[in-house]
């Protein structure tokens, strides 16, 4: 069923001729057909052996093989109820995820992008004020700042975590002073940004701190969940995310009743009672089918997070002694959601091509940082403006990562990387 949904999505995307990212991501997600040959990994004699075949970058079909029948039941329940928009499933998911993240309020919306946008709008930040954010992130983080009438101000990253450098944020706050209204920190690849230092810094400077938690639902920093930092956070349920739906979806998290109430109104055109519009809004609702699917997946989420940690651990063990590879290093107190397993490598293009030729898909997140993208050229950044960001863009490579990546498949692909650097 999910295979069909993705097939349909792919067809309609073709018709719409959307940007390459969508084709690339959706193609990599997989999700159609039977489990790949390589998943079996047992020879006739019963010894563990990788037998080749498709290793997917993200493999949704294996999760679906586990709990697909529960998802199908949930979908049928919603279809038969004929309650499709903002009904009991969305309300229940909001309650369950607010509890999971450890905040008072969660509001389901149509995508991670809309979650970020509505969060920014709900705060009524002064028009034209600056929002400090990383350039090493998915385009949506900066795109929504603009859409909300604010001006993105890119700063450099910490080379160890790929997240905002707190020193660079402090320096930008000193330089720009009252022009800055907010800091939008991204918890990239599933590792929470340095909120231990960002929270007091932003409080001290009187600027709003927000988290783009689109890749990091389930991650923790000092026992606090991603989504609970700053004044509000946004996450994404895009199918490839750690908690993914069968389509688009997103959610905002906050402890502030007013922010939650505004986002609730703004996701339905700013309506606060029937046909009475208090805020400028959008059609930004999460639908019942996606919420019902997410509630099933949430029941397996803790276990899938643990499985992702095991996959990451196997990568770390297999790659840490290689001179050509620098694996990620988590700061103390961090539990990553491992949305991506991203290493820095020497001779990236050659390694990528070598792995592709052996049937191993990899991805580069992100090849061209946002401050060098044509759409943000007018902001005045140039090559050399953010050296750590630009260096990361040249060196990063994300390896296949999903909870059901088998030890044999991993041993095979780690072996290939070792062979490449021999
Ligand atoms: C860091 C980041 N921000 C924002 C988004 C946007 O989320 P969505 O694709 O659900 O709109 C994504 C997801 O691709 C993301 O990775």
Image (cartoon, rainbow, N blue to C red):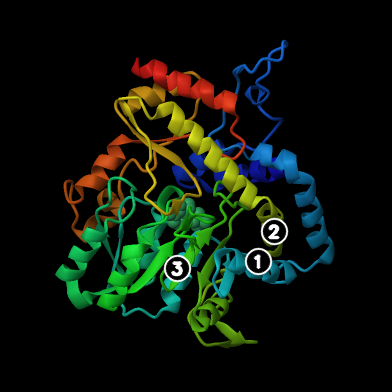
Residue 406 percent across, percent down from the top left: 60, 30
Give the SS element for disc 1.
Answer: helix
Measuring from the top left, give residue 258's x and y in whole percent. Answer: 50, 84
Which numbered tag is attached to residue 96?
Answer: 1
Tell me whether the residue at label 2 lies in contact with that at label 3, contact meaning CB atoms closer than 8 angstroms.
no
Discs 2/3, front: 2
- Distance (Cα) linking label 1 and label 3: 23 Å
Numbered label attached to residue 295: 2
Q: Is residue 358 above or below residue 172?
A: above
Q: Residue 260 at what x, y percent from top left?
A: 53, 78
Labels 1 and 2 touching (C-beta < 8 A): yes
Q: Position of residue 237 (x, y in %)?
A: 57, 55
- Helix, strand or loop at label 3? It is helix
Whether residue 208 sits left or right of residue 317 in the image: it is left
Mark 1–mark 2 Cα distance, whole angstroms, equals 8 Å
Q: Estimate how packed mark 3 is, as few (under 14), some (14 to 19) or many (20 or more) residues with alpha carbons within 10 Å.
A: many
Quarter of the rendering containing residue 324: top left
Does 119 sit above or below residue 310?
below
* Label 2 secondary element: helix
- Whether residue 296 appears in this view of the structure is yes
Q: Earlier in the sequence, mark 1 or mark 2?
A: 1
Residue drawn at point x = 83 percent, y = 66 percent = 81
Seen in the picture, residue 229 relative to 15 is either above or below; the reply is below
Instruction: Compare residues 127 and 206 and report the one nearer the observer.
Output: 206
């Amino acid at each position: 069923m999910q295979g069909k949904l993705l097939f349909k999505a792919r067809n309609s995307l073709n018709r719409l001729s959307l940007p390459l990212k969508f084709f690339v991501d959706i193609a990599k997600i997989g999700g159609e057909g039977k489990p790949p040959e390589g998943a079996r990994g047992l020879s006739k004699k019963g010894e563990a052996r990788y037998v080749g075949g498709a290793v997917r970058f993200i493999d949704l079909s294996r999760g679906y093989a586990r709990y697909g029948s529960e998802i199908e039941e949930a979908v049928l329940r919603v279809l038969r109820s004929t309650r499709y928009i903002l009904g009991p499933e969305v309300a229940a998911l909001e309650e369950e995820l607010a509890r999971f993240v450890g905040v008072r309020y969660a509001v389901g919306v149509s995508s991670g992008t809309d979650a970020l946008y509505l969060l920014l709008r709900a705060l009524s930040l002064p028009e034209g004020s600056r929002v400090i954010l990383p350039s090493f992130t998915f385009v949506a983080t900066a795109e929504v700042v603009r859409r909300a009438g604010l001006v993105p101000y890119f700063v450099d990253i910490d080379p160890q975590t790929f997240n905002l450098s707190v020193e660079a944020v402090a320096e930008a706050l000193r330089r720009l002073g009252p022009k800055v209204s907010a800091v939008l920190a991204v918890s990239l690849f599933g590792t929470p940004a340095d909120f231990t230092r960002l929270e007091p810094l932003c409080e001290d400077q009187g600027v709003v701190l927000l988290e783009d938690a689109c890749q990091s639902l389930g991650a923790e920093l000092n026992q606090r969940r991603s989504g609970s930092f700053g004044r509000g956070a946004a996450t994404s349920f895009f199918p490839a995310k750690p908690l993914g739906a069968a389509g688009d979806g997103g959610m905002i998290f906050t402890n502030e009743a007013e922010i939650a109430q505004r986002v609730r109104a703004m996701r339905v055109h700013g309506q606060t009672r029937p046909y009475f519009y208090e805020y400028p809004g959008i059609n930004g609702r999460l639908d019942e089918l996606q919420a019902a699917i997410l509630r099933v997946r949430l029941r397996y989420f803790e276990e899938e997070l643990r499985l992702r940690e095991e996959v990451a651990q196997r990568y770390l063990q297999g790659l840490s002694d290689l001179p050509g590879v620098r694996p990620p290093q988590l700061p103390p107190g961090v539990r990553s959601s491992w949305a991506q397993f991203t290493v820095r490598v020497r001779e990236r293009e050659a390694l990528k091509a070598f792995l592709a030729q052996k049937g191993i898909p990899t991805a580069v997140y992100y090849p061209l940082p946002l401050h060098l993208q044509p759409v943000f050229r007018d902001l005045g950044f140039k090559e050399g403006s953010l050296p750590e960001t630009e260096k990361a863009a040249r060196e990063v490579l994300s390896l296949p990562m999903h909870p059901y990546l088998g030890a044999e498949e991993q041993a095979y692909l780690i072996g290939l990387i070792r062979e490449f650097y021999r």
